[in-house]
Image (spheres, rainbow, N blue to C red):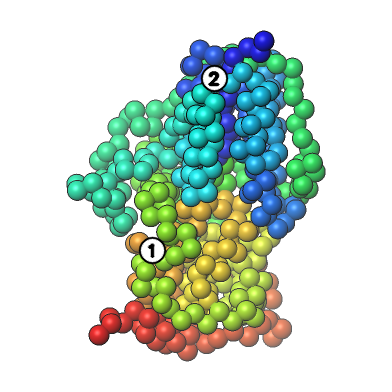
Amino acid sequence: MKAPVVLFWFRRDLRLEDNRGLFEALKSGLPVQPVFIFDTHILNDLEDRQDRRVEFIYEALLQMQQRVTSLGASFDIRIGEPLSIFNQLTTDYAVKAVYTNHDYEPYARERDQLVQHFLAENGIEFLTYKDQVIFEKAEVVKEDGNPYTVFTPYSRRWKATLQKKDWAGFQSHQLLDQLHKTLPIPIPSLEKIGFKASGIAFPDATWTKELIAAYQAKRDLPGVRGTSQLGVHLRFGTISIRKLASETSPWSETFLNELIWRDFYHMILWHFPHVVGKSFKPAYDAINWRNKETEFEAWCEGQTGYPIVDAGMRELNTTGYMHNRVRMIVASFLTKHLLVDWRWGEAYFAKKLLDFDLAANNGGWQWAAGSGCDAAPYFRVFNPYLQTQKFDPQLTYIRKWVPEFEELTYTRPIVQHEVARKRCLEVYGNALKPSR
Ligand SMILES: Cc1cc2nc3c(=O)[nH]c(=O)nc-3n(C[C@H](O)[C@H](O)[C@H](O)COP(=O)(O)OP(=O)(O)OC[C@H]3O[C@@H](n4cnc5c(N)ncnc54)[C@H](O)[C@@H]3O)c2cc1C
């Protein structure tokens, strides 16, 4: 007879410390078998066989496996569709319950419902917990119970709601002796999963008081190291949002606000899943996008003739990262100067960003296009030259990524700024004018 166990299903919470769902599983009184599924439904959609996000996940799993094998336990890592994997797992183990953490994306919600249903049919509980945000779903809402759609009042209420317990940690790492004891289970190679390593290093999962205290002054300057570069770690949960927020909040209110933006966009995605594929404000779906493919390609390749835009796109293509200020500039340029549908840009970022996160990416794109919940007004068209003067005055960032920008060989601007601005106002104006 197999000994009864509970499973802990890791997803975007790849750490053993301060992991809420894992903590609850470890307290269940039954041995906990850690599980990870390389979901082929997601992997099959990735075009690049050297996708560094898969490599990131893989490295995080290897690190955790090292720790758990030292305790006489092992990860069970599988490849396939979650539902059929649960079919196998419930045959291979005497599973009494499955623990996991909430995931707010539409695909994940549907997947979890299917899994929950399957488990329920087999008399197995599915228990899931808030872990990746400080406040979720309807925890921070207006007086009348409706969700906020504007950031500033949301952030005020967020701060008023916060109590120490909201970001107190969960001591999961102190209970690891409750893991299911087993011989090491072989981990499939990255090649077996269908991917290759790039060998490029990832940003560190650490932060310093010095960096965070200077965040307000430096965060808008792409030419200096002024932001945390923790995006990828927050995305995959290799750091705890509770630990990060509680530790850094005394050092910078501005940094805390950015973490609140993260909660805000997750909350928006939860309440308004139509933002995936559609404008938050429906009127914006009437915009007559130009969608010129050659111009879109020039933008993707960093060949628009606008140095700050080209620098951003080249940074993204080379490193999988782009500075936030520059993300705003390139997104505004694509949607307003070139009148390319924001969904094209969103999809390109989704392919390239190491820190790609559906909620934040969609929020960022709809903000730039003007179609979002708390978006830049449509008549605010960033001037890339003024943005450069303000945020890259020494041209440090531009020189790094577009060294040829002062030479005659450098691409001529794909469109004149003033022409593009007028065209944008006209096209947006036509779509948004009140119907008579
Ligand atoms: C068009 C566009 C697309 C974006 N796509 C993504 C994305 O796919 N994934 C993503 O995490 N962020 C996205 N952002 C938000 C922001 O640009 C990145 O979070 C930030 O640049 C990541 O760098 P960092 O870790 O150094 O951030 P820091 O400035 O050090 O901020 C710390 C953390 O706060 C969170 N954060 C900061 N700004 C925002 C924001 N505006 N919205 C939500 N969370 C925020 C992130 O988790 C970030 O890692 C996008 C912004 C725009 C304008």
The kind of secondary structure element at disc 2 is: strand
Tell me the residue at 70%/34% (across/down).
78
The quarter of the rendered structure image containing the C terminus is: bottom left
How packed is label 1: few (under 14 Cα within 10 Å), some, or many (20 or more)? many
Task: Report whether residue 430 is seen.
Answer: yes
Residue at numbered disc 1: 280
Residue at numbered disc 2: 96
- Position of 167 compared to 347: left or right? left
Q: In the image, residue 120 lies at what x, y percent?
A: 50, 29
Mark 1: is the Cβ under 8 angstroms from ligand 1?
no
Name the image quarter holding residue 317: bottom right
Q: In the image, residue 11 lies at what x, y percent?
A: 57, 37
Tell me the residue at 45%/24% (across/down).
170
The amino acid marked with disc number 2 is Lys
**Distance in Å between CA atoms under marks 1 and 2:** 41 Å
- Position of 308 compared to 170: left or right? right
Where 277 sits versus 310, above or below? Answer: above
Residue in front for this viewpoint, 192 or 216:
192
The kind of secondary structure element at disc 1 is: loop
Residue in front for this viewpoint, 224 or 140:
140
Specify the farthest residue to the left.
Answer: 143
